[in-house]
Each structure stands twice: as C-alpha cells, then as structure tokens.
Image (tube, rainbow, N blue to C red):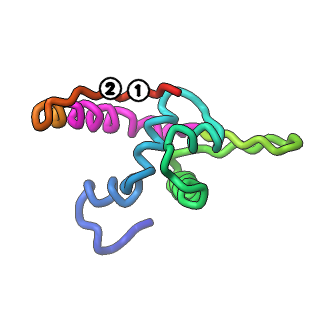
Amino acid sequence: MRDPDIRCGVEVTLAVMGGKWKGLVLWHLRLKTLRFAQLQRRLRTVTQKMLTQQLRELEANGLIHRQIYAEVPPRVEYSLTDEGRRVVPILELMCQWGQDYLQKTEGVTLSCTNEQ
C-alpha cells in the first residue's frame, strides 16, 4: 500500500477507504455483519464486480474480515475488523457534515441509517 508519493495522512486515508463505495460498505458494516447480497441490496446501484473489488481491497487493507462457512451453498459474511471499527467515528462525522451541508445549501434533511 505504501506509495512514496503520499505525503499526508489524508492521502493515506483516501487511498485506503476512498472512492464511491468503500465508505458506504464500511458504513453499512458498522452495526452488524452482512452477507454479499445484503450489502448489494443496500448499495442499490453497485455492480457485483465493483462490490467484489471493493470488498477485496478493504479486506487487503485490513478494514474488513471475510468469513467463509463450509456449507452448501457456501455462506460468506463480512464484518469490520478492529482497524475498520476505528474508521466509524470518521464516517459518523462525514454523515453529520453531509446532513448539515445539504440542510444549509438545499434545505434537504437526510438521515444516515442502516435500514433495509
């Protein structure tokens, strides 16, 4: 992961959990373990290929754990690691900032929840 061009902690954070889907995956895993299909339903417009890629990268970076159960058909569950749980306060601040921003700029009220 270490890129010699990275000079700032913000760059590291964005490299590890940046992009459209990684933060949302972590957000949905913050409260409970989920299976692939459950994540895909929560991230309605993500493709299977993209979700698979993002989950692999998050796992490789140590933010999520992938548990495979030896069943037929196989069951795979995803959960946050200790390192992944350290990101939750950052995501909560991002949620609050986004809510405040939309309320201020567009008069729109949002709620960041894990419903579905």
Q: Which mark is residue 4?
A: none
The residue carrying mark 2 is 111
Q: Which three-letter amino acid code belongs to the residue tagged 1?
A: Thr
Left or right: 75, with 81 as reference point: right
Left or right: 50, with 70 as reference point: left
Examine the image and state in which quarter residue 53 appears: bottom right
Residue 60 showing in the rendered view: no
Q: Is residue 15 magenta?
A: no
Left or right: 55, with 35 as reference point: left
Measuring 46% from the left and 41% from the top, which residue is drawn there?
26
Quick one: 38 or 15, which is closer to the camera? Answer: 38
Q: Position of residue 38 (x, y in %)?
A: 61, 37
Mark 1 touching mark 2, by CB under 8 A?
A: yes
The residue carrying mark 1 is 113
Measuring 56% from the left and 39% from the top, which residue is drawn there?
41
- Report the Cα–Cα distance between label 1 and label 2: 6 Å
Q: Secondary structure at mark 1?
A: loop
Q: Which residues are magenta?
A: 79-99
Q: Which three-letter amino acid code belongs to the residue tagged 2?
A: Ser
Examine the image and state in which quarter residue 94 appears: top left
Above or below, 50 against 73 in this view is: below
Q: Position of residue 42 (x, y in %)?
A: 52, 38
Left or right: 89, with 105 as reference point: right
Q: Position of residue 51 (x, y in %)?
A: 55, 54
